[in-house]
Image (cartoon, grey):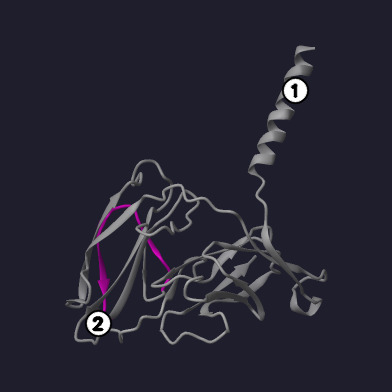
């Protein structure tokens, strides 16, 4: 009888845990593919959706001491210096906790607040941000910082009040299994989707999915092969923004 009670209790705990960890899909959109679009004989149905996300560190603050705004450096090693507050930096979180994007490139992760990067002549827009335990961007004001600077004899970016976009995930040519979700994790800087009447259009090959909030979007059931992805920040009427960082393009590979 004790064994029966033990197994019943174990099953109940597992059931409760499963229910608690199951995440509800929000605004799911499905798109059917013909067999001609896949490498298999079975037609695929691609799903776009997102989850209700929680920021575990809403009060985290990332300060950038170097570079300064429009600071000019000689080509070579450029110093980066940050200060982190209200966040368990270096205290057991797995993976890289501080990430840096330069000019819409793939992010590079760091587990130290002071480092140097070898940079060639050019004008750079840097976006630094903290991530949670899943590696997703923290998106509250103060969780991230952006800064323009120059290396060598170059001109600054033309002044623009237009918002722009930064993409944390995926990295270019990132690989997934056919069972995995592809996560599109992005941030809008210099503006607000609702207040500025903007939206984000996520395109995978020729399929579009629109989102009106800054939340990670998941794509499931992509067929095997390489897929071309774009993340575009546009006006609600579909008009393109003119800034150089309003669109980010990547590709992902499903194995």
User: Which region is colored magenta?
Assistant: 105-122
Q: Residue 133: image x %, image y %?
A: 47, 48
| Residue 121 tag number | 2
Residue drawn at point x = 41 percent, y = 84 percent: 243
The residue at the point 48 percent across, 57 percent down is 136
Report, in whole angstroms, how far the alpha carbon at label 2 lies from the one at label 1: 66 Å
Residue 117 is covered by the magenta coloring: yes
Identify the image quadrant of the C terminus: bottom right
- Quadrant of the rendered structure where residue 65 is? bottom left
Residue 167, horizontal then vertical, whole percent: 47, 69
Mark 1 = which residue?
7
Q: Quadrant of the N terminus?
A: top right
Horizontal and vertical percent position of residue 169: 50, 64
Quadrant of the rendered structure where residue 139 is? bottom left
Asked if disc 2 and disc 1 are in contact, CB closer than 8 Å, the reply is no
Q: In front here: 53 or 229?
A: 53
Element carrying mark 1:
helix
Give the left or right position of residue 71, taking residue 51 as reference.
left
Depth-wise, is mark 2 or mark 1 nearer the camera?
1
Looking at the image, the residue that sits furthest to the front is 195
């Amino acid at each position: 009888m004790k064994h029966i009670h033990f197994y019943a209790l174990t099953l109940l705990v597992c059931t409760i845990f499963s229910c608690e960890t199951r995440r509800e899909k929000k605004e799911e959109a499905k798109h059917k593919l013909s067999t001609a679009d896949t490498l298999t004989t079975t037609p695929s149905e691609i799903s776009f959706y997102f989850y209700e996300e929680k920021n575990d560190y809403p009060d985290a603050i990332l300060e950038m001491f170097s570079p300064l705004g429009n600071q000019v450096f000689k080509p070579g090693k450029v110093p980066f210096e940050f200060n982190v507050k209200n966040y368990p930096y270096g205290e057991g979180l797995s993976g890289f906790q501080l990430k840096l994007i330069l000019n819409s490139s793939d992010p590079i992760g760091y587990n130290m607040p002071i480092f140097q990067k070898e940079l060639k002549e050019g004008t750079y827009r840097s976006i630094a941000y903290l991530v949670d335990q899943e590696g997703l961007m923290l998106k509250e004001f103060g969780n991230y910082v952006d800064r323009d600077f120059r290396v060598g004899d170059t001109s600054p970016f033309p002044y623009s009040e237009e918002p722009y976009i930064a993409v944390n995930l995926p990295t270019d040519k990132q690989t997934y299994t056919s069972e995995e979700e592809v996560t599109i994790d992005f941030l809008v800087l210099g503006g607000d989707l609702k207040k500025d009447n903007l939206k984000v259009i996520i395109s995978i090959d020729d399929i579009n999915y629109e989102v009106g909030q800054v939340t990670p979007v998941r794509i499931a059931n992509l067929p095997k092969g390489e897929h071309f992805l774009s993340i575009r920040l546009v006006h609600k009427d579909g008009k393109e923004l003119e800034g150089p960082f309003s669109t980010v393009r990547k590709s992902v590979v499903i194995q």
